[in-house]
Image (cartoon, rainbow, N blue to C red):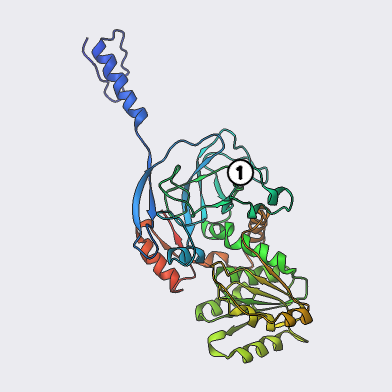
Amino acid sequence: MDCLTATEGQILTITVWTGYCHRGLVGYLGNIGNMTKTGRAVVYDAPNTPFVIREYPVRDVKPDEVLVRITMSTICRSDIHSYQGHRPNPCPGILGHEIVGVIDQLGENIVHDMRGDKLAVGGRVTWTEFFHAGESYYRDVHDMPQKSPGLRKYGHDLVEDDPHFLGGFADYCYILPGTGILKLPDEISDEEATPLNCGVATMIAVTEAAGINVGDTVVVQGLGLLGLYGCAIAKARGARRVIGLDAVSDRLAIASKFGADVTLDISAIGEDDLVAAVRAECLPDGADVGIEVCGHPDAVPLGIRMLRIGGHYVIGGLVNPGSTFTLDGNDILRGGINIVGVHNYHPRHLIQALDFVMSNRKRFPFAEIVDSKFSLDQMDEAFARAADRSVLRAAIVP
């Protein structure tokens, strides 16, 4: 019998198979089964070199994994530091850890998110920027899973290793075991949701560590995404007065929309006058809380001078090695100053970040912070614009 084909709308029934037809059909079906799905990734081979788009295979998920089709990722300042070689990061790799996307494949053991909401293919999610599976002394004894030895971060892995897609600047990302997954409400836009799992969750942790109380005065050093959210969260926590400090005019201009009562241009005033100006806004004797999110170590001694006796100071922006500064220990002792560093965040802070944005999205224009969008093949331009601060938060849309 000859091999037959059916035209559109016809049903073909084969009652007799010859070896030729059977082998041909089996071979055709086998080829379909072996066809490999691929996805694009923007790879950086070494610091300060042009980005390159490469394709990698997309395998099926394992039982404890999720595959997400990325809808947006944003360029964090730490991505820029890694790209510029200021902090160690594996190369070649895919940068990006502020990510949202739609579930493409769901491992059979993954049923609910951190809150108990059911997950399903097609649902939109975000997830913790780090993952760690296995035993952890810091998680189990000190409730600090974010400091578990062996912890890994999205955007900080070699792209050549399975499963390749572990960064935000790509078509896909795998969510691996030990990650906290959070389902996103339909109402929240990608622009509002993408910074949640880094910048916003970090500032929830920072402001918690600062112990901001109703009626406090708060100084925020640096008005990038972290600082703007810091102003907004401080206000939401009941701060009486928030003072924002920066040298970028666009940031100073927008800060009032996010709760800053006063902004000061640090490039237009000397250090002593700056300290005096801040303390004058924080009567009777200085600020209750100081928050460093500018990434400049010299800001720390200056910020501490702005505090009242017994004030709290949180360091949240010095993510690069070698961020040294000098303090007089006697000033810390006599002033009863509390200094704490915040690095990473507890998974519950991601849940709180989402709740904060959902509760305050009409009070503060969070979507305006993501003020530019680029495609994968525009990555070099996006990083240049983000690095020179001509954009506030650049988004990559595959």
Which residue is painted at 58% across and 63% down in the image? 199
Where does residue 2 sit, x and y in percent of width and height?
21, 13
> Residue 57, relative to residue 269: is it above or below?
above
Secondary structure under tag 1 reads loop
Where does residue 68 sit, x and y in percent of width and height?
49, 45
Task: Check the image and name the residue furthest to the top.
Answer: 16
Q: Is residue 186 visible?
A: no
* Left or right: 398 in relation to 175: left
Front-most of residues 26 and 344: 344
The N terminus appears in which quarter of the rendering?
top left
Residue at image mark 1: 133
Residue 44 found in image quarter: bottom left
> Residue 238, relative to residue 299: is it above or below?
above
**Tag 1: amino acid:** Ala
* Left or right: 363 in relation to 40: right
Front-most of residues 214 and 346: 346
Q: Is residue 323 visible?
A: yes
| Number of numbered discs visible in the structure rendering | 1
Where does residue 348 sit, x and y in percent of width and height?
68, 53
* Left or right: 384 in relation to 246: left
Where does residue 277 sit, x and y in percent of width and height?
66, 89
Residue 238 found in image quarter: bottom right
Which residue is painted at 59% across and 52% down in the image? 128
* Left or right: 211 in relation to 320: right
> Residue 46, relative to residue 258: is it above or below?
above
Task: Check the image and name the residue furthest to the left.
Answer: 2
Residue 33 found in image quarter: top left
> Residue 86, relative to residue 160: is it above or below?
below
